[in-house]
Image: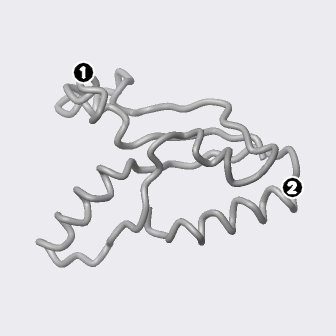
């Protein structure tokens, strides 16, 4: 993601403190996606580097008591017509979960 892990953690914990019991939905990249994206960025000189990736949705649960993963959704596993050419990735678990939308209770 474009923020450092410490920055995201700070925001999540501030939301948890300010809005206990609230729900948070965020999109996340896997560490592999971050690595692959940064290689592409280095070649194209776009400058939009990612700084960290979330290996497992449950990893955020360790950031504070009460943070709980409620659901996760991976676009390559859905029948979205616009992803038709990339849907082959759903057959390879490593690639199928490179981008996800995660739903937490804080």
Q: Give the left or right position of residue 56, taking residue 96 as reference.
A: right
Residue extending farthest to the left is 43
**Disc 2 target residue:** 19
**Disc 1 target residue:** 91
Residue at image point 19% right, 25% down: 88
Q: Give the left or right position of residue 59, taking residue 82 as reference.
A: right
Position of residue 53 measured from the top left corner of the image (x, y, whole percent):
43, 55
55 versus 36 height, above or below: above
SS label for mark 2: loop
Q: Earlier in the sequence, mark 2 or mark 1?
A: 2
Position of residue 101 measured from the top left corner of the image (x, y, whole percent):
51, 40
* Residue 46 position by quadrant: bottom left
Q: Give the left or right position of residue 8, taking residue 51 as reference.
A: right
Q: Nearer the viewer, residue 61 or 103?
A: 61
Residue at image point 60% right, 71% down: 7
53 versus 61 height, above or below: below
SS label for mark 1: helix
Position of residue 27 measured from the top left corner of the image (x, y, whole percent):
50, 48
Q: Give the left or right position of residue 60, taking residue 28 as reference.
A: right
Q: Nearer the viewer, residue 38 or 65?
A: 65
Which label was assigned to residue 69? none
Residue at image point 32% right, 72% down: 48
Residue at image point 78% right, 60% down: 15
Position of residue 75 measured from the top left corner of the image (x, y, whole percent):
39, 33
Q: Are marks 2 and 1 in contact (CB under 8 Å)?
A: no
Quadrant of the frame with the N terminus: bottom left
Disc 1 packing (10 Å; few <14; some 14–19; many ≥20): few
Q: CA distance from mark 2 to mark 1?
A: 39 Å
* Residue 91 position by quadrant: top left
């Amino acid at each position: 993601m474009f923020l450092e892990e410490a920055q995201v953690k700070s925001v999540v914990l501030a939301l948890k403190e300010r809005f206990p019991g609230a729900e948070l939905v965020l999109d996340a990249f896997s560490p592999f996606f971050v690595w692959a994206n940064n290689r592409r960025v280095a070649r194209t000189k776009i400058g939009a580097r990612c700084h960290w990736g979330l290996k497992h949705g449950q990893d955020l649960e360790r950031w504070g008591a009460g943070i709980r993963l409620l659901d996760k959704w991976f676009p390559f596993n859905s029948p979205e017509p616009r992803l038709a050419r990339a849907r082959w990735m759903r057959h390879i678990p490593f690639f199928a979960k490179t981008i996800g939308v995660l739903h937490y209770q804080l």
